[in-house]
Image (cartoon, rainbow, N blue to C red):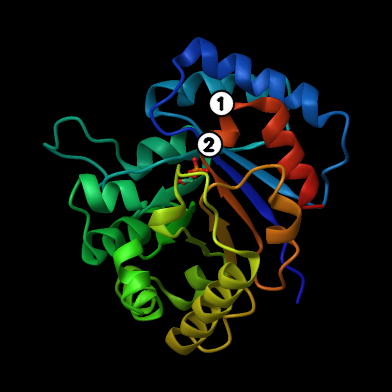
Amino acid sequence: MSRTPLISGNWKMHLNHLEAIQLCQKLSYELARHRYDQVEVSLHPPFVDLRSCQTVIDVDRLEFKLGAQNCHDQNQGAFTGEVSPTMLAKLDVTYVIVGHSERRALFGETDEIVAAKAAAVAKQGMTPIVCVGETLEDREAGRATNVVTTQLRGSLAKLTRAQFETLVVAYEPVWAIGTGRNASPVDAQDMCARARRVIDEIRPGTGSLVRVQYGGSVKPVNAPELLGQTDIDGALVGGASLDATQFARIVNAAR
Ligand code: 13P
């Protein structure tokens, strides 16, 4: 089963709209030196940068897919400060990260909330990138697999079978995010394979279709080995996605 690798840059709360345009352009320049038709690349800038990035991708005909980092589960309403799935779809957003560990830990997002967001994103024809991952405490207590399994069951509960077929799941161990300490390729492979089996249990026949990314301190130096694992279909990259040269090297490692 061939799954096109997806390398996603999660810019988190970095870069204003002018800096965002610059990074899109620098990145297209870096990637022009490589062939990456076998890899999909998505960029996830802050909400306020989306329109600028959409314009530059469109006008300069860049090969990137536009992504968002979060959204609300309702399409409109009295939800001060929130952004809806329909607003994102209108901006040609293709991928929306939901349930990132920072949203779970800092903004109280439960599996139930993540499930509602994932379903709302998929309903608008976009693809959710559903994030799961254990904390260091979970891992040291030997419950990493259980935690990830529970998160998957809860967070994917509202998706239809057809929506599973295009789904992206990102396994991001919390202890590896922003720490410079990535999961070993063997451990990352084990958990991504496990995630695939759980997905197949939830919706039989879809395990081999869903793309499972690894995230957590992915850098040019560790990308080739991580991306070379059978069940790792791409990377969700934080820090290194803010540097065009580093991100392009990670994209190149996925070919
Ligand atoms: P880092 O690549 O900075 O560890 O961040 C990973 C991440 O959280 C991507 O969503």
- Quickly name the residue at label 1: 54
- For image coordinates 64% across by 65% down, the residue present is 185
Q: Is residue 143 left or right of residue 194?
A: left
Q: Percent x, y for residue 241?
A: 59, 34
The earlier-in-sequence mark between 1 and 2 is 1
Of residue 61 and residue 110, the one placed in the foreground of this image is: 110
As helix, strand or loop, the secondary structure at mark 2 comes to loop
Q: Is residue 12 left or right of residue 232?
A: left
Q: What label sits on residue 92 in the rendered view? A: 2
Q: Taking 182 as reference, is 16 above or below it?
A: above
Question: Cβ–Cβ below 8 Å for labels 1 and 2?
Answer: yes
Q: Percent x, y for residue 33?
A: 88, 29
- For image coordinates 55% across by 23% down, the residue present is 53
Q: Percent x, y for residue 98?
A: 37, 52
- Extreme residue in the top direction: 18
Q: Residues within 10 Å of mark 2 (few under 14, many from 20)?
A: some
